[in-house]
Amino acid sequence: MTNTRPIRTRFAPSPTGDLHLGSVRTALFSWLYAKAHGGTFVLRIEDTDVERSTQASVDNILEGMSWLGLDYDEGPFYQMQRMDHYQTVLNELLDKNLAYRCDCTPERLTDLREKARESGDKPRYDGHCQHRNLSKDHSLPTVIRFRNPTDGDVSFTDSVRGPITVKNEELDDLIIARSDGTPTYNFTVVIDDRDMEISHVIRGDDHINNTPRQINLFQALGATPPIYAHVPMILGKDGKRLSKRHAATNVLSYRDAGYLPEALLNDLARLGWSHGDQEIFSRDELIQLFSLDTINKAGAVFNEEKLDWFNQHYLQTLPAKNLAPLLEEQLNALLISTDKGPALEDVLKAQASRCKTLKEMAEKSKYFYDDSLSFDEEAVKKHLTSAVFPAFTDLCLSLKDLSPWTPETIKQALKTCAGTHSLSFGKLAQPLRVALSGNTISPSIDLTIQLIGRERCIKRLQNTVSN
């Protein structure tokens, strides 16, 4: 099957829960394919499940897409706003005898399925109501079924899985409208893809069984089906489909945990797609290199340690000025004000190689801004002994008039102080870390002192000696 139409892809989530990683990867692949070919990326909200769809979920989808920078060219379109149109198409199919009403009860359908299983056959509707010509005013509730072809087969070339053929005799007459009149997923998705002139449908391979049915419906409507690409599921480390047992289910949880959109998109792009051995891709590189025929057929395992690796890379390579507002948000979430203290860009440069996420960085950088230190008791017991207090007192005098206030001059002052008190540099540095930050982990001690600032350092050292 070829497609010479303008490239138009779509992301069509159902707002019945949070935007999760599998959906985001589908959105990313659809976005990349459209961008790579100068096409159009459409966002469609499939909200026909009225009982489960919520505005909160819609907001979550829109906010998640915005955070990730997956900008859509058209939309968002909402299926619930197209109900009148769906009804018009349903009536057309009924008028053309391409669909029919069915009043088979749930009990009868259950009995059909049980008998099929007992005989080893594939459960399918037996066409009982095909020729009964039931009307809209029938006494019993009726669904509407699509009249699927009874002979021949459906063949299409999946851009990931290759040629696929399904015999029509294996497909039953699909329900396209429920008894309350609301259209079903398999119907609305075809009408929307037709009307929106979608050229390529990129979606999870859990939808692959729907594709032959949808292609038959396209053809009944006299429309050209899109090209399909069914991508494999994302798996957890146990090889099972990714769920909340393995990772956060809400993509915005990763934002709140201090991950960068660049890292998450890079990680998701590498789940099921590759370009040689390259690991790091800029957004422009992804657009330039992405293609459907390089998507793997097998499921890919999501590994948060790998995401941490990507995130730390971007913490170290993205401009600190771009990340500073994000670090400030994380510090503010910890009720830490950054009004008094070092420049956030300087903290970022000092901590980027030491932290995997912005949240971790904020937690490890509180002492630069907040004097209410939380002390590691073991570190205090080991390092803050009376033997170092005379050195602390002398160091306060040295730091008071030190100029310029730079890591280089601070380091020289520390060396002089250590020599005066017959201490190795390390024997002075570790107690200083504990006194100034509460624990033994920080950037180099000279840089730590510079960032904390002259007045804060002297005050903290004096408090240590007096207490």
Image (cartoon, helix red, strand yellow):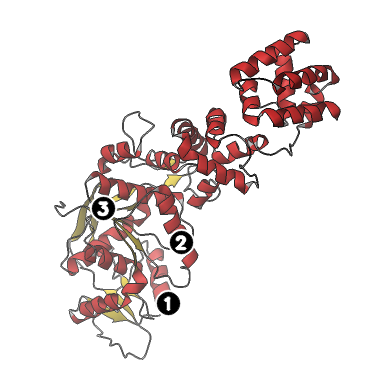
For image coordinates 33% across by 35% down, the residue present is 274
Q: Secondary structure at mark 2?
A: helix
Q: Position of residue 322 (x, y in %)?
A: 45, 39
- The residue tagged 1 is 106
Residue type, numbered disc 3 = Tyr
Say few, some or many: other residues with alpha carbon within 10 Å of mark 3 (under 14 / 14 to 19 / 20 or more): many
Label 1 and label 2: CA atoms lie apart by: 36 Å
Q: Position of residue 209 (x, y in %)?
A: 32, 58
Residue 378 seen in the current view: yes
- The residue tagged 2 is 59
**Is 327 displayed left or right of 435 in the figure?**
left
Q: Is residue 392 above or below residue 327?
A: above
- The residue tagged 3 is 228
Nearer-N-terminus badge (2/3) = 2
Depth order, front residue of 30/124 = 30
Depth order, front residue of 89/166 = 89
Q: Secondary structure at mark 3?
A: strand
Say few, some or many: other residues with alpha carbon within 10 Å of mark 1 (under 14 / 14 to 19 / 20 or more): few
Q: Position of residue 103 (x, y in %)?
A: 35, 82
Q: Position of residue 261 (x, y in %)?
A: 44, 43
Label 1 and label 3: CA atoms lie apart by: 33 Å
For marks 1 and 3, give the one nearer the viewer.
3
Label 2 and label 3: CA atoms lie apart by: 28 Å
